[in-house]
Structure formats: C-alpha cells, structure tokens
Amino acid sequence: MTQDQASLSAEGAAALEARFGRDFPKTVIVLGSGLGRFAAALADATSMPYAEIPGFSRSTVVGHSGNLIVGKAGEVPVAVMQGRIHAYEGHSPQAIAAPIRILRKMGVERLVLTNASGGLRLDMRPGTLMVIEDHINFSGFNPLIGPNDDSIGPRFPDMTDAYDPHLRTLLSQAARKNGVPIKTGVYLFAMGPNFETAAEIRMYAKLGADAVGMSTVPECLVARHCGMAVAGVSIVTNYATGIATRPLTHQETLAEAERAAEKLETLLRAFLHSL
C-alpha cells in the first residue's frame, strides 16, 4: 500500500471515530444486492453516508444505498455496510481495499459478507441461503496486487481458511436452532457485469463451484490479508444461465433477495448473539 493509501486509511478511520466514537463494533456485515432491510431494523442506529468517509466510494448499482450504519441487533453491537462497490463498476483494486482496511484500523475483527448469487445446483432453488465454505477467484482481479505494506499484512497471505471454520460452525448452529434452512458450498467470483454464458456455467460447475456472483471475494482477500476472520452467506436468487428457463435480470435478483431477506435477517441475528 502506498503512503497516500496509508494516509487515506488513517483519514477514514479518523472520520469514523469522530462520528461513532472509539468504541466501534468488532463485527461488520456487508449487505449485498437487495439486502438493506437488516440495517433498517437495527436499534440505536447511527448512519454515515459513504460520501462523508474518506476512502469509501459510492456504488452506482441499484440496491446498494451506500451507508455505514452502527447500531445493535438485539443487544449485540454491529456495524453494517449498506451496499458495496464492485470491480465491474470500474473501481480500482485500491478503492475496494480501502474500506476494509479502514474498518480494521477501527479494531474490527470479523467481517460477514453477504451477496446475491446464481445457483449451479438444482437443490439450491431461488431463495436458498448458502454458507460459503470456500471460493474460486475466476476474475483475474485481486485487490492485493501492487506494493505491499508489511505492517498491514504479509506479501503472500495464506488462504487455507479463507472463510473461518468457527464462524461457519456458528452460522450452521444458528440456522439449525432457528429453523432456517441452509446449504453450504463454493462461491465463484466472476468479474461481470454481464451474466455468465451457459458454457461458462457448465465449466464453473466442473471446477467445483456451487454458486456464482460478482462480489465478495475481493473483500475476503483484503480482510484475510489484514487479519480479520471472514464469514460469507449467499442468497441464491436464481438458477444460473443454462439452468434457468428464462433470461436473467438484475430486477429479478433484487426481488428474490428481498423475499429471502427475512430468513437472512433471522440467521444473522442469531449468529451475532452467539459470538
């Protein structure tokens, strides 16, 4: 990370401290497309638009409103990123890395990533929640490319447990105790912004992918590099191309994510309570 980026991280953290104080939550949840309702249900919430945080870029995608919200889920303090930025929007690797590093500078220890995805398995119907057990980066995009700041993380970070086994266990236990059906699987990150071709989907399935999407993996890489534990949950909003019987649209993604949001909210609240 260049000195300019390091200064930006310090400036961003200073802005967050000025708004939210030094006692910042240890857990941050990143909400994907159509999943903003969880943030709206937080108690004692304070909101800060990304536009007011140095280092945070605003998403141009419908369904990503662009606010950082700090509040309580029950009695558990949590920070929520209401929307994210994507590589396909033209954002640089540094722009995607900056918010995660700023949050780490605020003392955040756990990052929970959610997204909307296309399913590659017939047993994962639209509306299925899939706990991410591992990922495949098929994009060619990596936010860790470039100069490395050893004070933040190693030049060659290990990805043996990219998605923390303990956090995955807690998600599974929370789902079981609260009657929320879940699947587990491998998430494949494709650059987008086009939906995949049927031939690509057949290839991804042969590579071992269970769901495909256009986010999450860059944030996971940055978080693991700087020492955060990561968990991930996908809402399968549609069958992928070649499995689906009609053309895919972002509107369908948003609609299905909103329908499944109540299940995700129940899971996340129970998960946070177990930490």
Image (cartoon, rainbow, N blue to C red):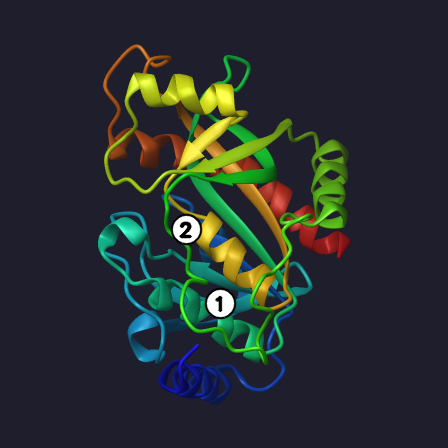
Instruction: Residue 92: name its quadrant.
Output: bottom left
Q: Which quadrant of the figure contains the C terminus?
A: bottom right
Q: Is residue 100 visible?
A: yes
Q: Are marks 2 and 1 in contact (CB under 8 Å)?
A: no
In x, y percent, where is residue 64? 32, 53
Horizontal side of 158 relative to 237 (left or right) equals: right
In x, y percent, where is residue 50? 34, 71
Image depth: mark 2 or mark 1 in front: 1
Residue shown at 42%/86% (left/top)?
15
Amino acid bearing label 1: Ile
Q: Which quadrant of the figure contains the N terminus?
A: bottom left
Residue named by callout 2: 36
In x, y percent, where is residue 164? 69, 50
Q: Secondary structure at mark 2?
A: loop
Name the mark on residue 100. Answer: 1
In x, y percent, where is residue 216? 46, 48
Horizontal side of 247 relative to 143 (left or right) equals: left
